[in-house]
Amino acid sequence: MLKTAGYTTGIFGKWHLGDAAPYQPNNRGFDESFIHGAGGIGQNFPGTESNPPNNGYFDPAIKHNNTFVRTKGYCTDVFFKQSLA
């Protein structure tokens, strides 16, 4: 509905609607996604694409449009800055 009204959609932060590929935000209609998986940064679950190994709250690897990117800073600040871009 938002896209048909001319809006661009995005999510920045925790995605908690499924970590497997079919449930990722880019496959659910979002134009932009900058997320970590369900459960929290650094938590991994077998069979999901939630977080890379050894991830943490400082300088986390974040999934940006289905590709992990290494960021600089504390995770909350990283999400906030990305949402402004």
Image (cartoon, helix red, strand yellow):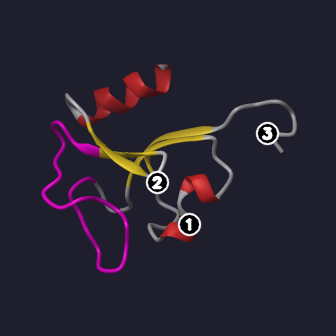
**Looking at numbered disc 2 in the image, what kind of residue is underneath it?**
Trp
Residue, far right: 4
The main secondary structure of the magenta stretch is loop
Relative to 32, say whether 83 is above or below.
above
> In the depicted view, which residue is nearer to us: 59 or 68?
68
Answer yes or no: do the residues labelled 3 and 1 have beta carbons within 8 Å?
Answer: no
Q: Which residues are magenta?
A: 41-61
User: Does residue 67 appear left or right of residue 55 in this picture?
Assistant: right
User: Does residue 5 appear left or right of residue 59 in this picture?
Assistant: right
* Residue positioned 30% across, 33% down in the render: 76
Relative to 47, say whether 41 is above or below.
above
The residue pinned by badge 2 equals 15
Residue 82's spot in the image, x, y percent?
42, 27
Q: Nearer the viewer, mark 2 or mark 1?
A: 1
* Residue positioned 79% across, 39% down in the render: 2
- Give the mark, 3 or 1, whose residue is nearer the N terminus: 3
Q: Residues within 10 Å of mark 2 (few under 14, many from 20)?
A: many
Asked which secondary structure carries label 1, the reply is helix
The residue pinned by badge 1 equals 23
Residue 44 lies within the magenta run: yes
